[in-house]
Amino acid sequence: MQSEQRPDHAVVVFVEMNREIEQIVDLLEDRLRRSMPDTTLSLAKAGTLAAVHRNRPITALFIAQHLSEVEIAELTRFADSMQIISFSPFAGDVERGILGGIAVSDRILPEINLGTLRRSGISLKPFFLRVARHYGSGAAE
């Protein structure tokens, strides 16, 4: 999705490995195998992303556990500087700087942090931006 290309190296970010993380990885691997078969999925502990990126450039991050304020700040700085898409299913993470998430109300919608999107230089399709709930600079919060 970097510059509207499919990610080829998605990373599941965790704090502490447990059975739930293994289940998330299994689910994501299955979905990726069917929809984006050329994508590699790997695991990385929060705080190790730069080293992982040096070995194989990351194009997408999926946050699998709640991160602290410090961990979120480090991850968003890294993702923005490397033009990496970051996604979290946790409430409040988009407001804290993660690029994308999920808004659950009477409908389920994507959430986008416009400030993060602008800083990262990543471009998303206009339709996706139209249907998403917006946070950050320029959003009607």
Image (tube, rainbow, N blue to C red):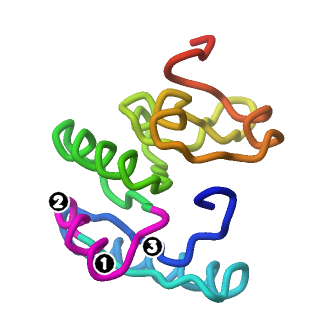
Q: Amino acid at mark 3?
A: Ile
Badge 2, how many Cα within 10 Å: few under 14, some, many 20+? some
Q: Position of residue 21 (x, y in %)?
A: 34, 73
Q: Is residue 21 left or right of residue 25?
A: left
Q: Which numbered disc flags the more N-terminal residue, 1 or 2?
A: 1
The label nearer to you, 3 versus 1, is 3
Query: In the rendered structure, does residue 106 fall within the stretch colored magenta?
Result: no
In this view, the residue in front, 107 or 121, is 121
Q: CA distance from mark 1 to mark 2?
A: 21 Å
Q: Is residue 85 above or below residue 90?
A: below
Tell me the element at label 1. helix
| Stretch of the chain drawn in magenta | 45-60
Which residue is labeled 2 in the image? 47
Which residue is labeled 1 in the image? 19
Q: Which numbered disc flags the more N-terminal residue, 3 or 2?
A: 3
Q: Is residue 66 above or below residue 11?
A: above
Query: In the rendered structure, does residue 49 fall within the stretch colored magenta?
Result: yes
Q: CA distance from mark 3 to mark 2?
A: 20 Å
Q: Position of residue 16 (x, y in %)?
A: 18, 67
Label at residue 40: none
In this view, the residue in front, 106 or 112, is 112
Q: Residue at x 39, y 34 (%)?
A: 97
